[in-house]
Amino acid sequence: MVIVGGGMAGLMCIRALRKADVDVTLVDRHTYNAFQPLLYQVATAGLNPGDVTYFLRAARMSQRNISFRQGELVGIDSDAQTLAFKDGGSMSYDFLVLSTGATTNYFGTKGAEENTFAIYTRAQALALRDRIFTNLEHAAASTSGEELCIAVVGAGPTGVEMAGALAELRNDAMASIYPELDPRRTHIVLIEMAGKVLGPFDVKLQEYAAKALRERGVELRLNTSVAEVRPDGVEFGDGSFLKAGAVVWATGVTIPKLVAGWGLPQGRGGRITVDENLRVIGHKNIFAAGDLALTPDPLPQLGTPAQQEGKHIGKQISAQIIGRPLTAFTYHDKGTMATIGRRAAVCDIKVLGKSVRYTGSLAWLTWMLLHIVLLLGNRNRLATFVNLFTKYLAPSRRTNPIVGDVPVFEHGQAIREEEQKKQA
């Protein structure tokens, strides 16, 4: 069997096939799995990229019926049961599992794809991290005293966590690391079209999150639409403009366009339609899971449904091999959570079918411990624990941001740019 996509769904499917009499080939365009819920920590220099990535071939160390092939799927011949890859190679299958996930949705906003930073992949997180520290270094080298601004578009969990982490970086680290800069002249702006943050959460949790963000100095611009993103900032729907050195796009996901070329049925948002058994409609031996799959009762595009679907598909295929009937997939909602920063988070946990909601330090500890447990590999768990412990529990003056290469900004260049601005 072939599993395309080494995300949560694909890896959980592999684990469920540990004892099955099958040869499994995992296919992914990357050689690693990136734990997306913590990529914003990489983007804000709280974690190393290696802390949240897992080498996919390492799965073979504990499960010998696995092999790996790096490649990008471009076509499926369901009659011949073969796959075509972008590099010109091909592969046959008896069972196929598709779990390639989703990508950033820009909703047709002019300039958004070209002029914003998404944090859906490791490369995107690193690019944003380097831009943030490049802007800080350039501002420190300049004598203009110009204000800095980072705008975050989208106040869902990703946007709230990103804005909170940026605010803490400014509040805790800038005074000692960048004495040349006034933290009060560095602005974090969270932009949301709706009138609230964390839309899917309970109202009290939304209010707590908004208050915690404001206490950290995050400016909330609610009921605000984005008409265009320019290289130097954001134009809003009312025609006003916000100058920003970096714009983070943290709102919405969509299915990659190449999925349309696979010849499989697609539903809302381009997701592949599956039945109650998670089989692709019209195909007995093709399954889909995670963000890519559209179930009869649509599920949120989150990690928990992906994990449960992947595990269920693995069990389904194991049952088919020995002649047992398929069983319908049942989703068990375990709740949602989001963190705003040190000792501030919101949790809505399902216990015996009832929601248990809480905030503050306990919610923050729950969030941190759960995300560490969900990481793949003990080395990643240990490294993440140490780095988060150092970041959040050690004195802020000892914070050591994890950064990469930053281009040199010559003092002469700074002076020339300031003179050009004065002349303009």
Image: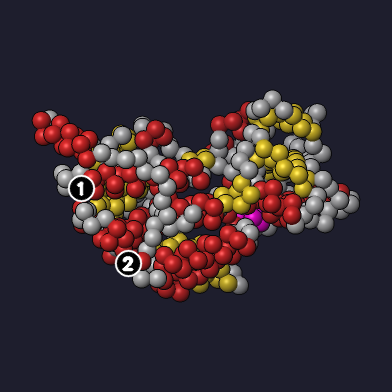
Question: On the rendered structure, is 149 left or right of 252?
Answer: left
Please, which colouring scheme is shown? secondary structure
- Is residue 263 in sight in this rendering? no
Q: Is residue 50 above or below residue 112?
A: below
Q: Residue 369: x and y, percent?
A: 53, 68
The residue shown at (32%, 67%) is 397
The secondary structure type at the circle numbered 1 is loop
Asked whether 138 or 377 is in front, the reply is 138
Q: How crowded is mark 2: few (under 14 residues within 10 Å), some or many (20 or more)?
A: few
The secondary structure type at the circle numbered 2 is helix
Mark 1 vs mark 2, CA separation in Å:
23 Å
Task: Give the amino acid type for the residue marked by disc 1 in the picture.
Answer: Glu
Q: Which residue lies furthest to the right in this view?
A: 323
Question: Looking at the rendered structure, which numbered label has been put on residue 147?
Answer: 1
Q: In this view, does 153 lie above or below 417?
A: below
Asked whether 410 or 128 is in front, the reply is 410
Q: How crowded is mark 1: few (under 14 residues within 10 Å), some or many (20 or more)?
A: some
The residue shown at (62%, 57%) is 376
Q: Give the range drawn in magenta.
A: 305-309
The residue shown at (38%, 39%) is 116
Q: In this view, does 225 lie above or below 260?
A: below
Q: Residue 147: x and y, percent?
A: 20, 47
Q: What is the magenta segment's predominant secondary structure? A: helix
| Residue annotated with mark 2 | 397
Q: In which quarter of the image is the N terminus?
A: top right
Magenta stretch containing residue 272, yes or no?
A: no
Task: Give the amino acid type for the residue marked by disc 2 in the picture.
Answer: Arg
Q: Is residue 119 above or below residue 77?
A: below
